[in-house]
Amino acid sequence: MPETSPFPTLVNQWQAAANQGNAGAVAALYATDAVFCATEGILHGRGDIQNDLDAQFKAGFTDIHLTNEEDHQQTGANWAYSVGAWNSNAGAHTGFWSVLWVQQGTSWQIQQHTLVTTS
């Protein structure tokens, strides 16, 4: 892992944009061909991810808190992964998440995102 990992910052950006209800800003963190395995199904591509998130935000999926528990990157690799926990709506919904990051030039994007709901 590099001395200064970019992943906690990216996770915080995801959380901040989600809590603003900004599905476009959240979707911009995903690769164009990303896959999101969510509770409501498997979403393919940035556009589908944005549309689903927009619907979720409009339906009241709010007050999202992400805990970034681990980041892993092999030295020199253009991929990495992060895992953590999440909750929303004051703890009414909880679960775990994982993200596979890919490096596109000098930036990192989400290639695959898995969200598991436990309550």
Image: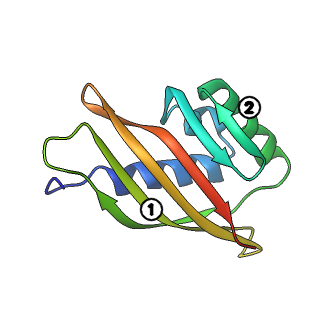
User: Observer-nearest residue: 118 or 23?
Assistant: 118
Task: Tell me the quarter of the picture where residue 87 sits.
Answer: bottom right
Q: Earlier in the sequence, mark 1 or mark 2?
A: 2
Quadrant housing the N terminus: bottom left
The amino acid pointed to by label 1 is Val
Image point (50%, 34%), residue name: 30
- Measured as percent of width and height from the top left, residue 39 is found at 74, 53
Image vertical order of residue 102 relative to residue 6, above or below: above
Task: Tell me the quarter of the picture where residue 117 sits.
Answer: bottom right
Report, in whole angstroms, how far the alpha carbon at label 1 lies from the one at label 2.
24 Å
Image point (68%, 49%), residue name: 38
- Measured as percent of width and height from the top left, residue 7 is found at 34, 52
For residue 103, side relative to residue 111 (left or right): left
Quadrant housing the C terminus: bottom right
Which residue in the protein does label 2 denote? 51
For residue 89, side relative to residue 64 (left or right): right
Instruction: Nearest to the eye among marks 1 and 2: give it.
Output: 1
Secondary structure found at label 1? strand
- Measured as percent of width and height from the top left, residue 3 is found at 13, 57
Which residue in the protein does label 1 denote? 83
